[in-house]
Amino acid sequence: MENLLEVKNLKTHFTLPTKKIGATKPVLKAVDDVSFNVHRGEVLGVVGESGCGKSTLGRTVLRLENKTSGEVCYEGRDVFELDKAEIKHLRTQAQMVFQDPYSSLNPRKKINSLLSQPLRIHTDLSPAERTEKIDSIMEEIGLNPRYKNRFPHQFSGGQRQRIGIARALTLDPEFIICDEAVSALDVSVQAQILNLLLDLQDRHHFTYLFIAHDLGVVEFISTRIMVMYLGKVVEFAQKEELVAHHAHPYTKTLFAAFPTTNPHARETKKRVVMGDVPSPISPPAGCHFHPRCPHAMDICSKEYPEMREISPGHFAACHLLK
Ligand code: SF4
């Protein structure tokens, strides 16, 4: 399959301030040596607990954060090597839908203004053509075009997220990063937005990088799933393979925490141990998951496990899985 995005050994580290004079500044390794690719037309789900680096990963891919090292190649070009004109083009091709529909829309601007701004900056469309485009996008995302003269606060949370999606669609992108795009919504509204995203993908052949902490949401929408823990990828597979044969102990805890109606599955869950998430500023040595892992061995606190292909297309980083 053709790769739209290739990420190689990406690191995004942040040096934090310290009040002690002369002290070494702590470094937060939000994304730490992450490699993956996104096939054109797929939905790659990225799942993990809050603070695992998945949102920073999405922002770095779009060059909204600076990388520390590594490569992010979009259609074969490293996005950190692009000149001004090429970055402008990337901004039309790759868009982002943010988590919070309440704060991601400027409350002082009407929807018409919010949606026409990217068209004014990036296209030569006339005012009449911009209006036609905005009306057609609003219809496509299930909002009456008459509502474009309203302010964001006049919409419900689900409608505001539809407007966030509409804003991402204005420039006809091919790649959309959804960063916790449904996390702030009620469950029934989540389902509507997920279905809308899938309908849009059918119609426009979008490629999504779908970031969420909710395994159920990621499982519903994704083609492949990548599991992250404290800045690193710990497991990566086709969705069906990961659901049926998740092998990494951390992925198992995620699945165990996932609500189920199967009484036998509930029995299995009782055996799973969960502890506090360590600080990403000073992650545990060796396998970062070892303080919480029910299968930890001596080697786990000393050596970080290599990512290995444990079955065709199924990768995991765990000393147990050799
Ligand atoms: Fe657990 Fe060791 Fe595997 Fe880490 S490497 S997940 S500590 S068994």
Image (spheres, rainbow, N blue to C red):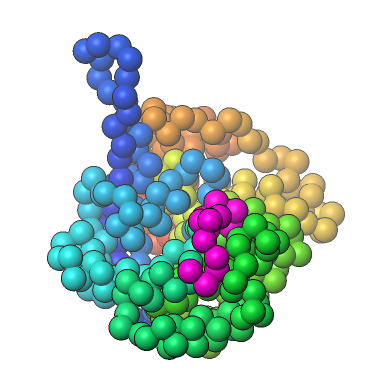
Figure quadrant of the N terminus: bottom left
Residue 311 lies, in percent from the top left, at 45, 66
- The residue positioned 74% from the left and 48% from the top of the image is 268
User: Furthest residue to the top?
Assistant: 21
270 relative position to 312: left or right: right
264 relative position to 163: left or right: right
User: Looking at this view, is 236 or 62 the one in front?
Assistant: 62
Residue 203 lies, in percent from the top left, at 53, 88
Is 31 a magenta residue? Answer: no
User: Looking at this view, is 41 or 308 the one in front?
Assistant: 41
| Magenta stretch in the rendered image | 99-113
- The residue positioned 37% from the left and 86% from the top of the image is 126
User: Looking at this view, is 202 or 292 the one in front?
Assistant: 202
| Chief secondary structure of the magenta portion | loop
Q: Work out whether residue 65 can be spotted.
A: yes
- The residue positioned 70% from the left and 52% from the top of the image is 258
Q: Work out whether residue 99 can be spotted.
A: no
In this picture, is 16 found above or below 65?
A: above
In this picture, is 319 found above or below 176?
A: above
Residue 137 lies, in percent from the top left, at 54, 81
User: Which corner quadrant of the image does residue 121 belong to?
Assistant: bottom left
User: Which corner quadrant of the image does residue 146 belong to?
Assistant: bottom right
